[in-house]
Image: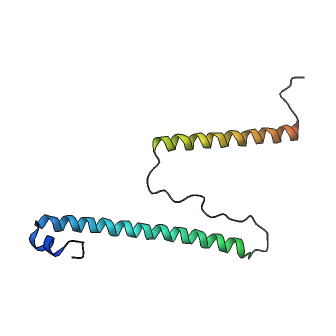
Amino acid sequence: MMYGMTYEQFWYGKPIMAQYYREAYKLKLKERNEDQWRQGIYFLDALNVALHNNINLSGKSSKPVKYMEEPLRVFPLTEEEKKVKAEAEKDKIMENLDLWKKAMEKKYGNRDSKP
């Protein structure tokens, strides 16, 4: 009965059904446990953000910490999502390189021109 079987299924059904219900019950408990674990991670991150942003023990001012931008992934990335993520990372790298180039030009001048 604990596995979700009815009285009739338990007593009058095929014995293998009890095994299937037991396996389904174990999977359900595992899923529930993983869900509670993820909730703990969310709580820990929220607590970390709250403490870091509101309690300053060092006396120095520091940047505020942000809460997670997106939820934790449960399923792996699809091929399309991998391509989009790789493209976004490439764009970010190119942007950082451009900023670095501009900073170097500002500091040392434009050395592309030949004397």
Furthest-top residue in view? 115
Instruction: Using the image, determine if residue 10 lies above or below residue 76.
Output: below
88 in relation to 4, above or below: above
Residue interval drawn in magenta: 62-67
Q: Residue at x 45, y 57 (%)?
A: 74
The one nearer the camera, 105 or 82, is: 82
What colour-coding does the image apply?
A: rainbow
- 34 up-or-down from 81: above or below: below
**Quadrant showing the C terminus:** top right
In the rendered structure, the answer to whether residue 110 lies left or right of residue 91 reads: right
Main secondary structure along the magenta-highlighted residues: loop
Q: Residue at x 49, y 41 (%)?
A: 80
The part of the image, by quadrant, that contains residue 15 is: bottom left
Residue that appears at 74% across and 75% down: 56
Task: In the rendered view, tell whether residue 16 sits above or below residue 93.
Answer: below
The quadrant of the image that shows the N terminus is: bottom left
Please report the residue visible at 60 percent of the width from the left and 62 percent of the height from the top: 68
Asked whether 66 falls inside the magenta stretch, the response is yes
Q: Position of residue 94 (x, y in %)?
A: 68, 38
